[in-house]
Amino acid sequence: DVMEERSDVDIQLLAVPGVRNALVTDYAMESVERRFDALYLMDIEERDASDNVINTSAPVSVSNTVNAFIARDLDNSFAAAYAPDVIIPDPSTGTNVKCPPSVAVLGAIGLNDRLKFPWFAPAGYNRGVLNSTVEINTKLNRSNLDDLYDAAQ
């Protein structure tokens, strides 16, 4: 509620990495939409082959994840949804750790703003590369990518 008040908080991006619960993400989307001046970077719930929300290290079913996201029937120009999780290096331990995708997206947007102006898209080989990301947690094939593109409509 505090973040929603434009005169109290000056933000351009809202991210709550790892928080995927639909009640929370819907509330965040609605709050950013009411502000009308910011973008919410949302991590979506990932689902397994049995269509259960993943809370462990179970393999992700991309089709079940996409279908569950489409079923939410969201219509909001002030939010961008991301999946799957990414693997990034942890400099404090020297190991690779799994992180929500919004972490990598924040890095891409920060890199974009450093290289160009904020109104340039964080895309392509110069501004869209996720240098901090070692790999994604779930390998995507062409069919998975088609499903993700269809969900973006």
Image (cartoon, rainbow, N blue to C red):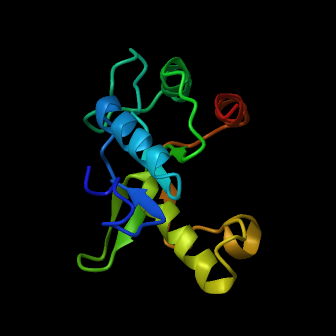
* Quarter of the image that includes the C terminus: top right
**Residue 23, above or below 50:** below
User: Can I make out residue 31 in this image?
Assistant: yes
Query: In the rendered view, does 20 fall on the left or right side of 63?
Result: left
What residue lies at 49% left-to-right and 72% top-to-bottom?
Answer: 132
In the image, 90 versus 95, the foreground residue is: 90
**Residue 146, above or below 33:** above
Position in image of residue 105 (x %, y %): 51, 61
What residue lies at 52% left-to-right and 46% top-to-bottom?
Answer: 79
User: Can I make out residue 54 in this image?
Assistant: no
Position in image of residue 59 (x %, y %): 40, 32
* Residue furthest out toward the top: 50
In the image, 102 versus 77, the foreground residue is: 77
**Residue 26, above or below 117:** above
Query: In the rendered view, does 111 fall on the left or right side of 127?
Result: left
What residue lies at 40% left-to-right and 70% top-to-bottom?
Answer: 10
Position in image of residue 34 (x %, y %): 45, 45
Determine the image quadrant of residue 60.
top left
Position in image of residue 151 (x %, y %): 64, 29
